[in-house]
Amino acid sequence: MPKEPNSRKTAGGTSLDKVNLMVVDGSAKSGELIKSILVELGFNNVFIASDGYQGVKMIREKHIDLVFTDWELFVLKKPLLAADPAESSDVPKADAEIKPEIKPEIKPLNGALFVKRLRGSTSSPNPFIPVIMLLPKVNDNDIAEARDAGVNEIVLKPFCAGDLCQKVISIIDKPRIFVTSGTYKGPCRRLAATPLPKESSERRIREIRLIRIDEHRR
Amino acid sequence: MSIVVNLEGSLSSEKVDDPGHTTAYEANFKLKKAIGENIPLDTIFTPEKIAAGDKAISDSRNQFFIVATAEIEKLLTLVNSESIDINKVLPEVARITASLKGEGEIHGFLLIQKICSHLLDTCQDQDDNSATKLGLIRDLLQAMHFAVKHEVKDDGGDTGRALLADMSHYREQKKTKTRS
């Protein structure tokens, strides 16, 4: 059993103490395992949510900076967030203190839907929050679904500690712009740096607004 | 193309009528600041920390079959008891199965993953016939017991694949019998 660290400092004098992580996993054991890996990597503040609803609540209450979510979140007793009729056109409000609406229907929720709601719902506590999804190696459709839900990075299971580190570093080192359109809200999905042909313009993004978003502090 | 830089940090909630309209935001995450803006990224996670993380994984892997065998045997006792209300037992079966599935996925135990998937699907089936559901759950738990007792770490080879094919076919057959 790893000893509880007081403060983990890296060689360069940085501390991961100020970073709040959340693991969303319907499996209690794998949630605990992922937490223990992250603690060994130096993250002291790791919270576990067993379903999407709890995850949303925790993001708000604990000021989470980074989410690790499992692909399957099958333990769900309450609906996650209201399905907004105007989801596609609303600009997400990062700082809004809006309580999730509770609707009577309960439906199975996978990790992709949790992320989609996080990105697109007007009552999301932080639609820009970085999300790493942990996905079993099943088929390419699941990977595409995860990407289209708006995750920042994907880690395929089985994984090692180095895989998690690589994805965290990728989020810090290569942050992608956050894009909202009629059908998608999330980090820009275009990873390949394909140059445009000469004398052509970027038609895909009709308007680029570089708006710096400073998250609310504790 | 217009570029607007707003350093105040608050988002406006303008409605955009054009469905093709795309807006890009540069979100200034605290993550980088908290770790240290000028710190070389390759020093954040030292080899010692990564090794410690990997040790947590291997320790869990070493314990997995011992713990899983005990839990499956507990479930088998539960589902084989004489007077049993399947709807009261289902949550416990689902909870333990979900837990083993998640951990099995992290370690890459494919056969265990698949059996757990079948078990969870059976638990969540809207099949009203409790006897059918109970029979299926018992069979799947037996299969799971076999896999964990023999510490099957991959797909179980030809035997494992045949077992999974049988399970899918068996479940379909039982469903058809129930409907008719």
Image (tube, coloured by chain):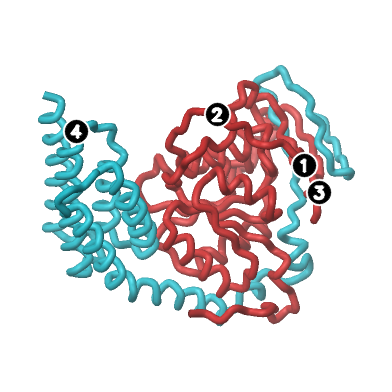
Chain colours: A red, B cyan
Q: Is residue B18 visible?
A: yes
Asked whether the beta carbons under mark 3 and mark 4 sit within 8 Å of each other, the answer is no
Picture quadrant of residue A108: top left
Could you tell me the amino acid type at mark 1?
Answer: Asp
Name the residue that disc number 1 marks: A95
| Classed neighbour count for the residue bearing mark 2: other residues with Cα under 10 Å, few (<14), some (14–19), many (≥20) | few
> Which of the two discs, 2 and 1, labels the residue nearer the N terminus?
1
Q: Residue furthest front?
A: B83
Name the residue that disc number 4 marks: B129
Q: Position of residue B22 (x, y in %)?
A: 69, 29
Could you tell me the amino acid type at mark 3?
Answer: Asp
Q: Residue at x 65, y 20 (%)?
A: B19
Q: Residue at x 67, y 35 (%)?
A: A123
Q: Distance from label 3 to label 2 (Cα)?
A: 31 Å
Q: Distance from label 4 to label 2 (Cα)?
A: 29 Å
Front position among marks 3 and 4: 4
- Chain letter belonging to callout 3: A
**SS for callout 1:** loop
> Is disc 1 on the same chain as disc 2?
yes
**SS for callout 3:** strand
Figure check: A115 above or below A86: below
B160 or A60: nearer the viewer: A60
> Which of the two discs, 3 and 2, labels the residue nearer the N terminus?
2
Name the residue that disc number 3 marks: A214
Picture quadrant of residue B73: bottom left
**SS for callout 4:** loop
Name the residue that disc number 2 marks: A103
Could you tell me the amino acid type at mark 4?
Answer: Asn
Front position among marks 3 and 1: 1
Q: Residue at x 44, y 51 (%)?
A: A26
Front position among marks 1 and 4: 4
Could you tell me the amino acid type at mark 2?
Answer: Lys
